[in-house]
Amino acid sequence: NPYFHPTFLYESIGSLLIFILLVIFNVYFIRKKRLNKTFFVWSIAYYMISYSILRFSLEFIRIDEAPMLLGLRWPQFMSILIIFSSVFILIFNSNAKTKKI
């Protein structure tokens, strides 16, 4: 099949959009002076969730071979695990009491 989607380009554009959104998110919280220890954890967790959703979505249109697990390509399965672990981290840190830095 000579036709394919340029998933590398889609991933680059998606990563750039994620970066821009996280910068806006971080600038907002820095200006509001709502920095605490959980702020940094939240930033990392939101990146992991966003990138994993991007990667999961792009795996549907990739044409290369990848191992399958439970009907999903291996990167999709790993993306789901990363999303669940990041959500768990967000829930765990939202309940934690922290002091302002």
Image (tube, rainbow, N blue to C red):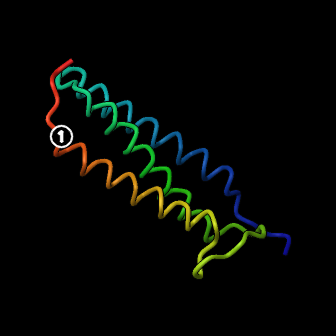
Residue lying at 64% horizontally and 71% vertically, measured from the top left: 73
Whether 17 is drawn above or below 7: the answer is above
The residue singled out by tag 1 in the image is 96
Residue 63 in percent (x, y) is at 75, 70
Quarter of the image for the C terminus: give it: top left
Left or right: 87 as drawn, with respect to 83 = left
| Nearer to the camera, 56 or 100 | 100
Give the SS element for disc 1.
Answer: loop
- Disc 1 packing (10 Å; few <14; some 14–19; many ≥20): few
Q: How far across and down, in percent of the image, does residue 39 sit? A: 27, 32
Q: Position of residue 78 (x, y in %)?
A: 55, 61
Residue at image x 25%, y 22%? 30
At x 17%, y 26%, the residue is 34
Residue 7 vs residue 22: left or right?
Answer: right
- Using the image, determine if residue 59 lies above or below residue 85: below
Q: Where is 59 relative to 39, above or below? A: below
Left or right: residue 61 versus residue 19 is: right
Tag 1: amino acid: Ala
